[in-house]
Image: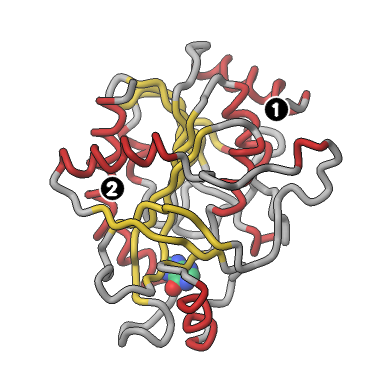
Amino acid sequence: MSRNAEAVAALVRQRAGTDPVAVGLILGSGLGHLASAVDGVAIPYADLPGFPHAGVSGHNANLVVGRLEGRRVAVFGGREHYYEQGRADAMRLPLEVLAALGATRLIATNAAGSLRPDMPTGALMLLSDHINFSGLNPLIGERTDARFVPMTDAHDPGLRTALRAAATAEGVTLHEGVYAWYSGPSFETPAEIRAIRILGGDAVGMSTVPEVILARFLGLKVAAISTITNMAAGMGTESISHEHTKAMAPLGAAKLERVLRQYLQKME
Ligand code: HPA
């Protein structure tokens, strides 16, 4: 753990208390509501040295530490994406801080385009695995041998089983599939989407994969859920835009919140 992360974790403890955090949650575009449901303290990223600066619109740049369904959680109201500054490791320090606060699990959420007709706008998809279509990696430049992170079962099987059970208990359909990370910020072309389909992608988005790699590097168990906000380029008739993403994210957000709350209630 870097000294920086220890120092930021100490700051967080000063403001939000010293009880260890059990789970970290990263909220994707248009999914910020959950942060306000936490009974705890919201700390602006600007108060935390090394945290992302200006967020993307649709994100709320606070770290909220407190209780949700009685569990101690740390909720990242926004993430920095690779496309903002060309830094694939932009979320490294925040995730190091999460680990320093005691968390052993991370659940990431995002908005994504669907490549599967049976998974329309408003659907939820649990990531069974991912394809790093960008070729980028947040561990480039890491000098220790810890950089050679195994990525088999990177999306933790136990965590996925528990999230599946939570969805079933809530009567929420949770699709499962492979997420392809595209760097953004431009959206994909229809030809790229056809290529991703052939390669085995079920959904496409501009985030999450770096965080999954970093989480595994840090020894955190990780799982991720996409909210489908559109059919991917060339697959549907809806327009694809950031505005559309933000407008459609709430369709899945309410279901996602129920699944996450149920997961936290039953968590061992
Ligand atoms: N592509 C990439 N990222 C996205 C999409 C998409 O179609 N929808 C929401 N985020």
Vertical arrangement, residue 185 with respect to residue 89, above or below = below
- Residue 153 appearing in the image: yes
Q: Position of residue 255 (x, y in %)?
A: 22, 49
What amino acid type should be assigned to the residue bearing mark 1?
Answer: Ala
Ligand 1 lies in which image quarter? Answer: bottom left
Q: Position of residue 141 (x, y in %)?
A: 83, 48
Q: Earlier in the sequence, mark 2 or mark 1?
A: 1
Q: In the displayed structure, does residue 71 sit left or right of residue 195?
A: left
Q: Determine the CA span between mark 2 and mark 1.
A: 30 Å
Q: Is mark 1 within 8 Å of ligand 1?
A: no
Q: How many residues crowd around disc 1 within 10 Å: few (fewer than 14), some, or many (20 or more)?
A: many
Specify the farthest residue to the right. Answer: 143
What amino acid type should be assigned to the residue bearing mark 2?
Answer: Leu
Q: Which mark is on residue 5?
A: 1
Vertical arrangement, residue 232 with respect to residue 53, above or below = below
Residue at the spot of label 2? 256
**Quadrant of the rendered structure where residue 88 is?**
bottom right
Task: Give SS at disc 1.
Answer: helix
The residue nearer to you, when weighing 9 against 222, is 222
- The C terminus lies in quadrant: top left
- Residue 26 appearing in the image: no
Residue at 76 percent of width and 27 percent of height:
2
Residue at 57 percent of width and 16 percent of height:
13
